Image (cartoon, rainbow, N blue to C red):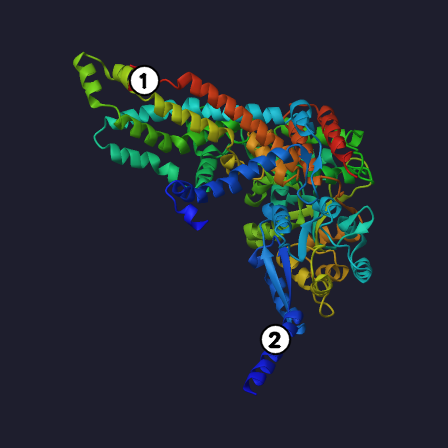
Amino acid sequence: MLSGLLTKKAAPWVFLLPIVLFALVFFVLPVLFAAYISLTTWDSLSPPRWVGLRNYGFLFLTDPVFWRTVWQTLYFATGSLVIGVPLALVVAFAFSRSRSPGVWRTLYTLPMVTNIVAVALIFSFVFRETDGALNRFLGLLGLPGPGWLTDPSLAMLSAILVFVWMELGRNMLLFAAGLQQIDPSYYEAASLDGASTWHLFRHITVPLLRPTILFVVVTGFISGMSYFTLMLVLFPGTQGGPSRAALTTGQYMYQMAFEDLRMGRASAVAYVLFALVLVATLVQLRLMRRGGVEVH
Amino acid sequence: MTARLWGATAALALAAGAGAAQEARTIQVATHYTDEQVAPLLACFDAYEAENPGVTVEHQQTAYGDFLQTILTSRVGGTAPDIYNVYSVWVPQLAAAGTLEVPPQDMLDWIAASYSPSTLGAATINGQLWGIPTELSIYALVYNKKLLEAAGYTAPPATWAELREIAQKITRVNDQGNIDVGGYAYGTSVAEGVHPFYSQMFAAGVAPYAEDGRSTNLTSPEAVRILSDQAALFADGITSNAIAVDNFASGAVGMQISANWNKAGWQEAFGDGFADTVGVARIPHDAGPGGTMLYSFLWAVDSTSDVKDEAWDLLRYINTPQAEGQLSCTGQMMAGMGSLTGNAADLATITAGADDFDRAFIEEVTSGRAVTQPNIWQASEVDRILRGYIDQAWSGAMPAADALAAADAEIQAILDEQP
């Protein structure tokens, strides 16, 4: 038995065994268990009771909050990408052509290593309606001061802006790494042909960065779809901001599971969210999979 | 011979060890209180250990927000504490799942004899008492005396119409039209929206839920009127989402319906000016008998505990005043937090040395005006749904009647789930 494990053929499997076991216990089994639980009603205190597809039916047909959270989550995920990705790309491109790119990169990655509670606290002072820094500034200009964190129509936008600020450093680093992979001779050749900085960015940087852009967009979208930590600390004590305007599906699922003890329904939400993320990711891969220098 | 001697010695040692193991008992007590808050109780645990050799009492502190999850996780893992200090609204689910142990008859008799009748309801589900009421949270109108005086009023409002008039005069807005000082405030949490609403319903003489917990009174004319009146405060610019109950401590709120447990925070904020600044009055009401709501935490024992008798004995110990005119250990802890227990002897002792703030809240309990929050099925989920629709009415997105009708429909579906 032991000699069989020591053969050359078995060696890779022996080395892989720990990670395979880890994945089995902490990924495969929970995923399968959640699939089963989503077809039951279970409060985690008493045995699960089989209800078939009733949890999914409730979410799709009865629950007035679920679809609202889905739209709000999509708004958050896409809003963060629409504002954050171009911003990070432009910043990374600008820094790559600056005199001290390392200094700038270090400065811009500071939000990434800042504790999220501290971030939320700082922005709560910035966004406060009555005496926040932003509204004070708007007041100096004679403008009204909206309730950035208390007005339901602005709450999610405020969360997006903070999230973009938090993620800017991460995305910028990824783009910076991608930019370093681009052969400088392309830029030199284009410059000799009279290309402006905008043309260099538009016709060399962006096309050759498509794999990095794809990675940033896909991972950013996936994390945005399941994200709610910032909302918990930015709108403390609420159930997802004023009038639940910043309630994401992830947080709603958490409330179902651990506050309402509706593990079955929460598992169904997890699977619906998984399906949405999977479809959206496949679409993004389809739209953006071709990229890089090999295309040309 | 030597071998025999060693054998006999080993046998004696094993027997002694087994005996000691049989005697050694550990009681694990789980609460959400911080080390500072729970200090009087820890001292009491030490005293109990000294009086009961072989018994060890361990305290497990878990944040309030994680408490229910911790119970669930520990039970799944087979490491459940023996004693819980749980919020009363969690009890229906915990009891239905067999998590809690029914108190023995002598404990039931002792609780019934020692606790204020209006507090027993907080620990009772369908006629069954599940534990010992402890931290009482009673709602009343809390007001800033100085802001009222500055607005020309020396007495708090008795009706909602008076409240609205006073609040209007207190309210101040800045150049951008945002409220600097709110005449009235609500809070951002579920409880800070729902509990004042329930309190006003009790004051109007209508319980929010039927006595059997199987239907609501949320579409009653009283409920609709109360929510409409609340929404009018937002529409009139007397309050807003930005002016919350937390702002009371900074002197930016004139009035709010709040619970007594806020006292310690306000004492810290106002210092020596506390008594001259913070006033307490009954919940204003335009019709009905008057009254308010209270909720409670309760001491309960886990059904899987292997030291149930010892656990109940410990609970009786920490909830019994050790001498005439003294507070029980739980009472000491509550007093330190500016809170109250339901223990009649503790309440009598606290009343003897109470300030105006405490006396106003205690009177709501001892007079029977305070009614316990209904321990309905899925109470926290129900409250969250209701809070969502209250928000809709406050923001003007839905008329109060429509919001409450929608809340009623969703909540009724949940109440219909119960066995």
Secondary structure beneath label 2: helix
**Side (left or right) of A116 relative to A87:** right
- Tell me the chain of label 2: B
- At 72% across and 24% down in the image, what residue appears? B402
Task: Kindly indicate the quadrant of the structure image that contains residue A250.
Answer: top right
x and y percent of residue A104 in the render? 28, 33
- At 64% across and 56% down in the image, what residue appears? B81
Residue type pointed to by label 2: Leu
Residue type pointed to by label 1: Pro
Query: Label 1: which residue?
Result: A207
Query: Label 2: which residue?
Result: B14
- Looking at this view, name the residue that lies furthest to the bottom: B1
**Side (left or right) of A177 relative to B210:** left
Q: CA distance from mark 2 to mark 1?
A: 78 Å
- Tell me the chain of label 1: A
Up-down relation of residue B414 to residue B142 (above or below): above
Q: Is residue A141 visible?
A: no
Disc 2 vs disc 1: Cβ atoms closer than 8 Å? no
Q: Nearer the viewer, residue B32 or A42?
A: A42
Up-down relation of residue A278 to residue B71 (above or below): above
x and y percent of residue B397 in the render? 64, 23
